[in-house]
Image (cartoon, rainbow, N blue to C red):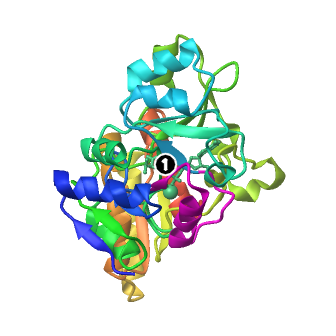
């Protein structure tokens, strides 16, 4: 398949919308990561997204809408809590898991009676959804298992030749995927952490915010590891190189990283170090750094742990742990 890689002009966005409306696949920028979009109401189109990504089909997709009004066509139940959350965070990197209407096919929700809905803040994304005239189902636009794409080059790397259109856009501002929040229960529950944190959500709703306990576990915890967001159970974000996280007091971490680096280099290995200062910078850069490491063909990645005390650090650590296959060296 020949993929058209297009500047986000008005004309090209109209064209990309038409392609999606007619069942084609379009990658587009959002503020979190690039998405791989298809008509969310067209089961056949959605199925081809799974194929292009090489993704298991029990993994539900997020349905993207251009404005708050779009929500009413996808769910019958819009609670006061959801209105507060929309006012506080939409457009933006919050996905709400709601009870779905019948028009959303089970192919889109991986067989679930709920659907994740999100209104992105990136204008190109919303213009594209509007041009399509249908809600857009979109997972991250990477081959399944690779780090999520935060620059258009990443999308080209993974998707050129597999999809119809890639809409170019800026580097993604946030850099990690949206916070996924289940709002079908008594209290809202975070199923995937993101830069909108539990504290942010509690401030908006005036209620406690729960966190899916599986987020704090790892697959080797066995039967207890049952994430409510099916996507959280897969090995994600994996770079090709071996990766270890070094955790502890920052000065000790730096020392340990330098020591491990020089040992590995003595064995002739190529080493890539990732040390972030602040949570937002880490969120913004992590996936791009992992892809840099891959393209440089390094053997070993050493990453300093983020403090999980602040919510953004927690969200970044969640991705780092998966990338490193939960390998942590404590100092
Ligand atoms: O920021 C984002 O959310 C990006 C951009 C493109 O919008 N999209 C994204 O999609 O990260 P994806 O498919 O890579 O991740 C979707 C996550 C998965 O962990 C999935 O299991 C969860 O959301 N999810 C979607 N619908 C769900 C539902 N009905 N119930 C529980 N989890 C759901
Ligand atoms: Mg993904």
> Is 9 or 188 nearer to us in this picture?
9
Judge whether residue 251 is colored magenta. Answer: no
Residue identifier under label 1: 317
Q: Quadrant of residue 168?
A: bottom left
Q: Position of residue 260 (x, y in %)?
A: 42, 70
The N terminus lies in quadrant: bottom left
At horizontal 83% and vertical 52% (from top left) the residue drawn is 223
Q: Quadrant of residue 297?
A: bottom left
Q: Which residues are magenta?
A: 38-60
> Is 146 or 27 nearer to us in this picture?
27
Q: Is residue 241 above or below residue 221?
A: below
Q: Is residue 145 above or below residue 128?
A: below
User: Is 290 displayed left or right of 281 in the figure?
Assistant: right
Name the residue at the bottom extreme.
268
- Callout 1: 10 Å neighbours few (<14), some, many (20+)? many
Q: Position of residue 87 (x, y in %)?
A: 40, 18
Query: Is residue 330 in view from this perspective?
Result: no
User: Is 124 displayed left or right of 207 in the figure?
Assistant: left
Query: Is residue 140 in view from this perspective?
Result: yes
Task: Assign a secondary structure to mark 1.
Answer: helix
At horizontal 41% and vertical 54% (from top left) the residue drawn is 253
Q: Is residue 213 above or below residue 302?
A: above
Q: Position of residue 242 (x, y in %)?
A: 50, 74
User: Is 26 displayed left or right of 58 in the figure?
Assistant: left
Q: Position of residue 100 (x, y in %)?
A: 65, 35
At horizontal 33% and vertical 67% (from top left) the residue drawn is 165
> Is 164 or 97 nearer to us in this picture?
164
Q: How many tags in the picture?
A: 1
At horizontal 49% and vertical 63% (from top left) the residue drawn is 237
> Is 239 or 67 nearer to us in this picture?
67
Judge whether residue 46 is colored magenta. Answer: yes
């Amino acid at each position: 398949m020949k993929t058209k890689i297009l500047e986000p002009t008005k004309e090209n966005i109209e064209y990309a919308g038409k392609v999606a409306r007619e069942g084609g696949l379009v990658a587009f920028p959002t503020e979190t990561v690039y998405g791989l979009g298809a008509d969310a109401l067209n089961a056949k189109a959605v199925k081809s997204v799974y194929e292009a990504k090489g993704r298991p089909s029990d993994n539900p997709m997020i349905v993207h809408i251009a404005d708050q009004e779009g929500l009413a066509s996808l769910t019958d139940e819009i609670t006061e809590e959801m209105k507060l959350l929309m006012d506080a965070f939409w457009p933006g990197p919050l996905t709400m898991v709601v009870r779905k209407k019948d028009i959303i096919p089970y192919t889109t929700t991986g067989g679930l009676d709920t659907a994740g809905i999100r209104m992105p803040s990136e204008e190109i994304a919303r213009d594209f959804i509007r041009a399509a005239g249908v809600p857009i189902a979109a997972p991250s636009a990477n081959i399944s298992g690779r780090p999520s794409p935060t620059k258009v080059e990443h999308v080209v790397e993974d998707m050129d030749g597999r999809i119809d259109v890639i809409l170019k856009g800026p580097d993604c501002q946030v850099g990690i995927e949206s916070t996924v929040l289940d709002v079908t229960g008594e209290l809202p529950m975070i199923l995937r952490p993101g830069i909108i944190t539990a504290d942010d959500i509690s401030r908006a709703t005036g209620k406690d915010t729960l966190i899916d306990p599986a987020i704090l576990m790892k697959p080797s915890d066995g039967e207890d590891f049952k994430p409510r967001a099916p996507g959280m159970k897969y090995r994600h974000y994996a770079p090709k190189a071996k990766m270890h996280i070094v955790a502890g007091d920052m000065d000790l971490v730096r020392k340990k990283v330098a020591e491990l680096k020089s040992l590995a280099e003595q064995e002739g290995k190529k080493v890539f170090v990732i040390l972030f200062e602040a949570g937002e910078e880490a969120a913004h850069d992590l996936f791009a750094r992992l892809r840099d490491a891959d393209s440089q063909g390094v053997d070993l990645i050493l990453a300093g742990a983020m403090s999980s005390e602040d919510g953004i650090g927690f969200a970044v650590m969640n991705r780092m742990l998966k990338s490193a296959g939960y390998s942590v060296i404590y100092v």
